[in-house]
Amino acid sequence: MVILLIAIFILGYLGIVLEHNISIDKSSSALLTGALCWTVVAFTSNDHELVNEELLHHLSDISSILFFLMGAMTIVELIDTYDGFDIITDRITTRSQTKLLWIVSILTFFLSAILDNLTTTIVMVTLVKKIIDKEDLRLLFVGIIVVAANAGGAWSPMGDVTTTMLWIGGQITAGNIITQLFLPSLVCMLVPLLVITPTIKGTLAAKMFSDEEQHQTSREKHIVFFTGIGGLLFVPLFKTLTHLPPFMGILLALGFLWLVTELILKDKEEHFRKNYSVYKALEKVDMPSVLFFLGILLAVSALQTEGILTDLATWLSANISNQTVIVTLIGLLSSIVDNVPLVAASMGMYSLEQFPADNSFWELLAYCAGTGGSALIIGSAAGVAAMGMEKINFFWYVKKISWLALIGYFAGIGVFLLLSGH
């Protein structure tokens, strides 16, 4: 059964990778893979009730991620519907492609620590789409956004789901993880940025915004923008205060923004209501990418249920004595499979008695799990979101971005080891 599960996962993975070659949408491959993996688990189990319990347990975790993703995407699309991002793009006056790359990267790095890498990627990719019309250039920017978002999320307890897991589990503390990982994470972003900067030359064309008459007023644009961004910023605070999952915070923010837009539209003409309602934003939400995410997470959860990921982590521990090498490999492995179950398996393998809170093992694990996923486009939530929004080809990302992400990844590890005295 284990061999069959791994075979299905690999075939599904190849289907996703070769999406453009075989002309089959990656969401179809992901859903088939996830459903087939669980079908195999069900057929080979003697306890069907236990399988259902395991599936529902994983589905609750998966659903919380998907609801968060859909809520964040809806808020971003609603802001975009009201041209709210013009408030930022109008202030980015530089036409230098190099300067714009640095502005976008640094903004992404710090914003992902405040929000999280997934929400930040959605916001920044939407922003770049409004500024850059040339596809090749825009895709390079999006690739660097993924690297910067994952690097920015790693050093904040709210920035990446795996760092949050370690924080909630007591393996790390908020203040310590910020001080220990900020510099390695910054280097992880800066090295790829410095390498790619000489290849980004020239100036942007005139603004790519529509000159069509806008029906919404500046006041309405500002209300929706600041309410939406405020709602996204509110989510980490909500989680801290209530200890409820982040998706509850994003749903609360979406509900409030929806209420605000309903009040704005209350006395408007019918055509205005049709073009600026939440329903219009929901039409623009990329549901295929959400379903792709669902399929991937279902497939990984099936592997986790059968203990395949835990066995892999145990094998690593038994055959590789150097903990730094193990954590580095876990980070690289997270670019192939989801980093959440890998970190969960690591938390189960190594106790707080073996590695106390704020031990360098946990700090390096937070860094590697957070940034290692940048090596492949499907290796992180940020990458999956960007892939869905810009239809990025897997091999294009491998050719153009993966090597940049890897040198940044290893440079950050080097800085961490120097700072920690290893």
Image (spheres, rainbow, N blue to C red):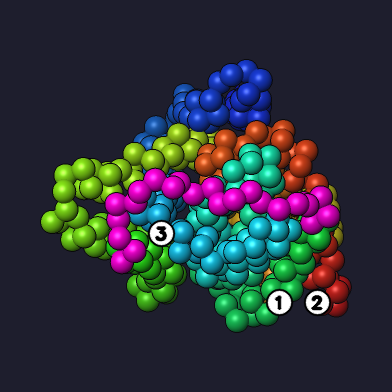
Closer to the camera in the image, 163 or 102: 102
Q: What percent of the width, then of the height, locates residue 237?
A: 41, 74
Disc 1 residue type? Gln
Pointer 1 and pointer 2: residues touching (CB < 8 Å)?
A: yes
Residue 316 at x, y percent in the picture: 77, 49
Q: Is residue 248 magenta?
A: no
Q: Secondary structure at mark 3?
A: loop
Q: Residue at x 46, y 58 (%)?
A: 85
Where does label 2 land, which residue?
Answer: 420
Image coordinates for residue 156, horizontal then vertical, percent: 59, 71
Q: Residue at x 43, y 69 (%)?
A: 233
The reply to whether dot 3 and dot 2 touch (C-beta < 8 Å) is: no
Q: Is residue 294 visible?
A: no
Q: Residue furthest left?
A: 267
Which image quarter holds the N terminus? top right
Q: Amino acid at mark 3?
A: Gly
Give the position of the C terminus as an image quadrant: bottom right
**Alpha carbon separation for disc pair 1 and 3:** 36 Å
Q: For this rendering, which residue is in front, 86 or 59?
A: 86
Name the N-terminal-most of marks 3 and 2.
3
Tell me if 262 is positioned left or right of 345 in this view: left
Q: Which residues are magenta?
A: 196-219
Q: Residue 153 or 41: which is nearer the viewer?
A: 153
Q: Residue furthest top?
A: 22
Label disc, if present, on residue 84 of the rendered structure:
3
Q: Is residue 269 left or right of residue 323?
A: left
Q: Residue 154's x, y, as percent?
A: 63, 65
Q: How would you rate the neighbour count of disc 2 (Cα within 10 Å): few for under 14, some for 14-19, many for 20 or more?
A: few
Give the residue number, with chain letter if any, for mark 1: 180
Return the mark for residue 127. none
Where disc 1 sits, the SS reads helix
Q: Which mark's residue is nearer the viewer, 3 or 2?
A: 3
